[in-house]
Image (cartoon, rainbow, N blue to C red):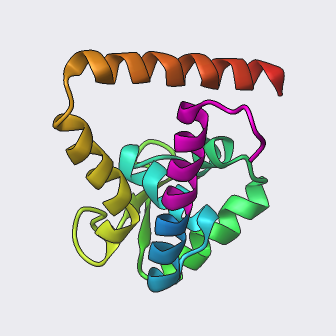
């Protein structure tokens, strides 16, 4: 890092580094890639998601999402179900529980963050949330 960065900026850089290390270690122990872990989290958030929706979220091609889902189905991490109304459509569901070991390792860092945040005064948390949202928006528009 360069001289002149704020304490908040340096703390955020450390936070991001530790978060990345934590998630990388969890993915390695579970044998899943970064893209696979993102897919698992999205499917957990939207059980029954369609492949086209997952493709949009992950930013991959149709063939890419098909390959990804096929691989995770073969490993027993996902299942497909045909749509009752349209047999050409399938929905994707998790076969593992991301809240149970060993899969909870993927979210352990964020659970620890939530626990630490609960101990802080709400005004302090609100201030940090506001700053992070502004920084994120600014970075989004700069890209």
Picture quarter containing residue 62?
Answer: bottom right
Answer whether residue 5 is visible to the viewer in this image. yes
Residue 40 place in picture, x, y as percent = 46, 60
> Please, is residue 103 above or below residue 7 in the view?
below
Foreground of the two, 65 or 45: 45
Residue 6 % position (x, y) = 61, 30
Q: How many marks?
A: 0
Residue drawn 52% across the image and 42% down it: 11
Quadrant where the image shows the C terminus: top right
* Image: 117 above or below 37: above
Residue 87, given in percent of the width and then of the height, sits at 52, 52
One can see residue 75 in this view: no
Q: Is residue 106 magenta?
A: no
The residue that appears at 50% across and 49% down in the rendered structure is 15
Q: Main secondary structure of the magenta part?
A: helix
115 relative to 25 in the view: left or right: left
Please say whether residue 14 is one of the residues in the magenta stretch.
yes
Q: Residue at x 64, y 68 (%)?
A: 68
Q: Nearer the viewer, residue 18 or 11?
A: 11
- Whether residue 25 sits left or right of residue 122 in the image: it is right
Q: Which residues are magenta?
A: 1-20
Which residue, as the protein is rendered here, is positioned at the far front? 3
Q: Residue at x 75, y 62 (%)?
A: 64
Q: Quadrant of residue 99?
A: bottom left
Across and down, in percent, residue 59 comes to 72, 46
Q: Nearer the viewer, residue 74 or 81?
A: 74
54 displayed left or right of 126:
right
Q: Is residue 125 above or below residue 67?
A: above
């Amino acid at each position: 890092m360069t001289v002149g960065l704020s304490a908040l900026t340096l703390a955020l850089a450390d936070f991001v580094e530790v978060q990345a290390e934590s998630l990388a270690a969890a993915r390695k122990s579970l044998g899943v890639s970064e893209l696979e872990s993102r897919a698992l989290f999205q499917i957990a958030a939207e059980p029954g998601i369609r492949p086209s929706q997952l493709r949009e979220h992950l930013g991959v091609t149709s063939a890419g999402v098909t390959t990804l889902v096929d691989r995770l189905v073969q490993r027993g991490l996902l299942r497909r179900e045909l749509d009752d109304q349209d047999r050409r459509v399938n929905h994707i569901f998790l076969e593992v529980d991301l809240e149970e070991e060993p899969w909870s390792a993927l979210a352990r860092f964020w659970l620890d963050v939530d626990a630490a945040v609960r101990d802080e005064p709400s005004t302090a948390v609100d201030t940090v949330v506001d700053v992070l949202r502004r920084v994120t928006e600014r970075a989004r528009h700069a890209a």
